[in-house]
Amino acid sequence: MTKHLFKIYHFYKKELNLYGDNGNILYLQHFLKLFNISSKVYSINSFSTNLEPCDFIFAGGGPDLLQNKIYENFLTHQKFILNHIKSGKPSLFVCGSFQLLGKYYLTDKNLKIPGLSLFNFYTFSPKNQNFRIVGNVHSKINFNNNIFPKKIVGFENHNGRTVLAKSLQPLSYVDSLKKGNNTQDYSEGLLYKKTIGTYLHGPVLVKNPLILSYLLSEFINIKNLEEKKVFSSEYVAYKNASFKKR
Amino acid sequence: MLINVLLFFISIIFNLIKNIYLSINKKYKFQTLPGYILSKTKIDFLYLYLNTLKIPLILITGTNGKTSTTSLINHILTKSNYSVLSNLSGSNLKRGILSALVLNYYKFLFKKPNFCLFEVDEGVILDFAKSIPKSIPKTYLLLLNLSRDQLDRYGEIDTTALKINQAVVTHNITLIASKSSYAHHFKKYTILQNCNNTILINKLKINGYPHLIKNLNFITNLFLLLKPYLQYSKITPFIPVIGRGSVIKHNKQILEIHLSKNPVSFNNNLKLLLNSKYKRVLVVMNDFIPDGRDVSWFYDINYKLMVRAFTNKQIFVAGSRSYDFYNFLKLNNIGAFNILNYKDYLVFSDSLGFKFTFIMSNYSATTNITAYD
C-alpha cells in the first residue's frame, strides 16, 4: 500500500507573512514527522489554478498593501476553499486571511471590500485609526474538549474589528474588551469543524501545539502524544507566555 | 536670554542629581529622567533650546543602525574640529533627546555647537518634527532603512513611512533615503547615491563591519549636501558602540556582543558570525517593553542562513523567552543548551574554561549584559 502523502497548501507565503506566521508550516511539518507522516508543502500564489484537493490549508496575515494585491486572486479559490472546509478537513487562517473568509471588510473610508463569504461575519476598520488591538492574549476555550487546554496563548496586532453572527462559534473568549475579535464582545477567532480562524500570531501552532493536535486528530493518535514527548519544551514556552506576571 | 538662564539652572540641578545618583548606584541609568520630568511641564523645551541655537540639524532614523551611524557622524565631525550636540547614549525618544540636551547644556554655554545631531526613533519622527523651530537653517533626515521591528508599537511599516513623509512635507526637512519598497510614500526625497568611501573606510578601520560601511554611504551623501570641511589626517579608527560589535572581558573570557533585535539585524549578525572564528554562540532573548512583547519575529529570520551560521557551533540560549527561541531552533534541527540566564552562562563558561563567545541579544538583554560587565 502506498503511504499517504500529507498535502499542505500554503496560500500566499510571500505576501501574507507579517508576523512570522510561516512558522506554523514549519511546526506542522515537524509535528507530522513525529508521527511518521510524510508531508509536502505546496506554495499557492497568484499564478496557481485548478487546485487538486489537499489535506491542510494555511494562510497568514500581511500588511494591507500586500493583502490588497492577493485579494482578487484569493476570491478565485472560493469554491475550492469552501469544499475543503465543509468536508471537515483541517485549515488555519490567521489575521488578514481570517478576515477575508467573511462577507466583507469595511474600511475607515466606508469602502466595502467583499470577502469570500464563506462565513456569516464581517470586519470593519474603526474611524479612530490610533487604537490597534495589540498585545499578548490568554484566551479561554469556550467548549468542553479533552484535547484543548483551557487556555490558548498568542500575540495579536490588528486594526480590523471582526463581528461574528450569533450562529458562529468563536475559537475562544478573551478576558478584556480591549482584546480579541473586536471591542464589543469577548470573542476571539472562529471555529467551524476543523477550520480555525484567529488573530493570534506567535506562531499560534508553535505556542499551542494542542490546537494542532485537535486539527490533526483524524491523522494521529492523540493518546500517543505523551509518549512522543511532543510538548516538553513547547509546554514550558506556553507556560511562560500564559502564566508569567509582568 | 531668559530660556538660556532657565536651561542653565535646570542643567545644573539635573547634573547634580545625576552625580549623586551615580555615587550611590554606580550604574548609569539616568538617561531619560530629566527629559521625562521636563516633558510633563507642557513647555516645549526642545523647541525653545533649538530656537536659541539656529544651527543645522541632522536626524538619523530607521529600524537598524541608528546608534552606530549617529556615533560615526559624531566621530568624523568632532575629529574634524566641529563641536556637535548629540544624544549618543542611544535614548532616541523625545524625552531621551531632551535629556541629552539638558545634561550637556553646560558644555555649550560659551560656545555654540556647530551641529545638532540626533538619533530619533522612526516611530516618533512626526512628533519630534513639531519641535523643530523655523529658525533652524536646515534639517536633514537620514532614513537608513525600514523593516519589521516592534510591530506591536508601530503597526505596519507603511504606517511609519507615511508618518515620516508627513514630517518631511510639513516641516521642510531634506530626506535622504534609498530606493525601496516603502519609498513610494515619500513625496520628496534625495535618493541615496553610491559613493567611493575607501579613504574614510580605511581611516575609520571599519572593514570588518559591513553594516557600518553600508551606512557610511548615507553619511557621505549627507556631507555632499552639508559640505563640512573634513580633516582626513585627524580621523582616527572608530570603536564600535557598546553592544554593536563591541567586546567585553569577563575573567578570562572574551565576549563579542551584537544587538539582534529584529530579523534584519539578526540576519546581519549571522553573516558576521559566518565570517568569524567563533565556535560558541549565546543567544539572549527577552520580551520586556524596550524589546516589544512579540517574539514571533524569530520566524522571519533567514532559516537557511541561520543553519549555515550555527553549524558546527555550540549554541546556548538564555533570557525570558529562551524557550521560544529554543523551540525555534528545534524546528530547524539545531540543538541548543537552554541556560535561561546570562549570569549562569558566565559561571558555566568560566568553569569549563570557555574563552570566546559570540553573543546575539535583543535590546534589553544587550543593556543587561553591558551593565553587568
Image (cartoon, grey):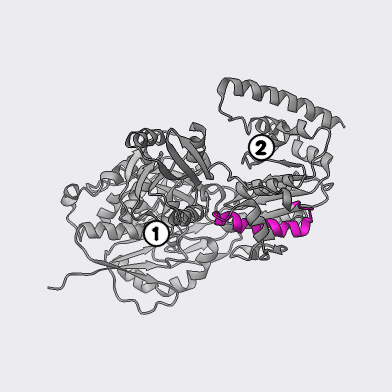
Instruction: Please give the label number shown on residue B303.
Output: 1
Q: Which of the 4 image quadrants contains residue B214?
A: bottom right
Q: Is residue B223 magenta?
A: yes
Q: Which of the 4 image quadrants contains residue B37?
A: top right
Depth check, front residue: A44 or A108: A44
**Label 1: how many Cα within 10 Å (few below 14, some 14–19, many 20+):** some
- Horizontal relation, residue B265 to residue B129: left or right: left
Residue range corresponding to the magenta coloring:
B207-231
Q: Amino acid at mark 2?
A: Arg
Image spot of residue B170 (x, y percent): 76, 54
Q: Residue at x 49, y 35 (%)?
A: B368
Image spot of residue B240 (x, y percent): 58, 46
Is B171 placed above or below B248 here?
Answer: below
Depth check, front residue: B245 or B177: B245
Is A216 placed above or below B43 here?
Answer: below
* Pointer 2 residue: B95
Chain identity of mark 2: B
Q: Residue at x 68, y 65 (%)?
A: B193
**Quadrant, the C terminus of chain A:** top left
